[in-house]
Image: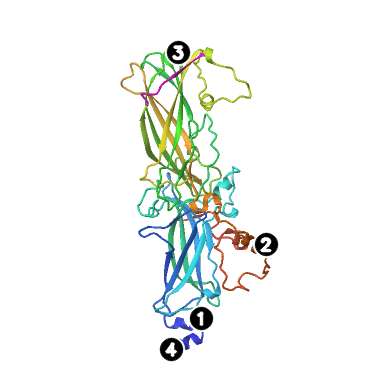
Amino acid sequence: MAASLLSTGTRAVDVLSPFGRPHIKIDFTNQRDGNLAPSFTTGDRIEGTVTISASHLISFDEVDIKLEGTQTVTVERGAVPGRSGATQTFLRLRQPMQDSSYPTPRVIEPARTYQFPFTFVVPRGLLPHVCSHSKKNAHVHHSHTLLPPSLGDPMLAQDGKTLLDDMSPDMTRVTYQIRAEVLQKPVVGPAKSLKVTQRKIRILPAVEEEPPLTVLDNDPVYRTRREKNVKRGTMRPRQGRLVAAASQPRPLQLNPPNKEFESVSTAATVHLRFDPVGDEEPPRLGTVWSKLRVATYYAAHPWEDYPNSSAVSVVGMTGEGVYYDTVPLSKMCLASAQWTKHANNTLVRRDSLQSTSSAESITGPTACFSGDVYYTASVVVPVTLPKDKAFVPTFHSCLMSRVYTLDLCVSYHTPNMNILTPTVSLKIPIQLTSGPSSTDSAGKSDEVITQEEVDAEFFSPRSVAPPGIDEPDAAVAPPDYSDLTDYHRSNPLPGSRPQIVPL
């Protein structure tokens, strides 16, 4: 019976089971046992197999396998009940399928399985047309076309086994998935989807260090220098003026996926200066606390500039929001720190072409400095990320951003101040980057090209026939943006531009 139906055409098979649906299973190559989701970084190959089976005869025309990246934002309106949101599909790579990969005729028979291998390469960036909205900053387009990390899904853990908090709100989510779909194309009308299956993956892209931020004195977020009066008591005259300053430290470089955990750390240096009144002594230093402030900005419309707390509306009517979280880092005693005394006669005038040290440039004299004597001290504060949180690199996309701030608080002691311990605090910008995998270090391959391969490449006859004609079984390169640029120009992605969708 089945043979007669097959001989009359594949569409006749649907008579046996008009409501039959195939079964789709997605498996990854070399996935570790017990992992909730496989993790990849820039340049990694995502390899696996899509297995299709059915309990009835089902005709089909195409198997569509894609790698998709999507970001979704939901914003609660403060003054008026309700919410708004936006969804953007910023990445879509399709697996090329050859006709020889399909059975003949294209029918899924019961008690048989059909396997379709796939291979994708995690790209280094996105196509330029993904970010096509207006911008107020020339650098925003470059930031928005970098690959954002997976965010907001607790199933995508840092080590692949343990659920860790990535400190993002429920309103934001960046998701990557392998999507397999079985399609049936009628003679007239659009293609019909018989079954769709998704399998999530975690992507932590390699992120390089950006130039340090330029922080102005009136910056609404950061404070790299502070001055404070030092008093012997609440109602007593001041003892002098204390300056605390620090520059942006080296970034914290996260470990690439599938690598044994290594401590992620850096160090920040706090420079202190005390300008006394008369012959007063500098205060005794107490303790320095450090914590990491995590800010996730999100909006229902594309950001035209890099977001900050002053740009986000408090009432939430502009469709923007920010979510803060704080991670305590360390507490260190400074009782052994020593002040260095500088007299006016030890100062040497420098030539205009000779640069000063960073400590002298950021801890300049205060308004009360008489020009005679001042004291300086430097404190090195180690910064190490805890293991119980999932961190992602600093990034900016069309709909959301993740930035980090290092909060440093230094206490000091003066006579007759026994009730409240005075402190001076700083807010320093700090970057989180991510290193490349060992197989794609710095984007270069460790393979050695032999002389025979060079001769074969440059001195052997070439075939000018299109790929697949002379060699029908030739290997197909993994899909990357280089093969999709012309396709997307003529077939723009339906979700390539952020769109506001009702929720």
Q: Is residue 337 magenta?
A: yes
Three-letter code for the amino acid on which mark 2 is drawn:
Phe
**Element class at badge 4:** loop
Compared with 467, 496 (above or below) is above
Observer-side mark, 3 or 2, equals 2
Determine which residue is flagged by label 1.
Answer: 105
CA gap, disc 4 to disc 3? 104 Å
Find residue 202 and report its horizontal and vertical position in percent.
44, 55
**Dividing the image into 4 quarters, which one contains the C terminus?**
bottom left
Answer with left or right where residue 156 lies relative to residue 450. left
Residue at image point 63% right, 74% down:
470
Helix, strand or loop for disc 2: helix
Q: Which mark is residue 277?
A: 3
| Separation of residues labelled 3 and 1 (CA atoms) | 94 Å
Q: Nearer the viewer, mark 2 or mark 4?
A: 2
Dot label at residue 458: 2
Range drawn in magenta = 334-343
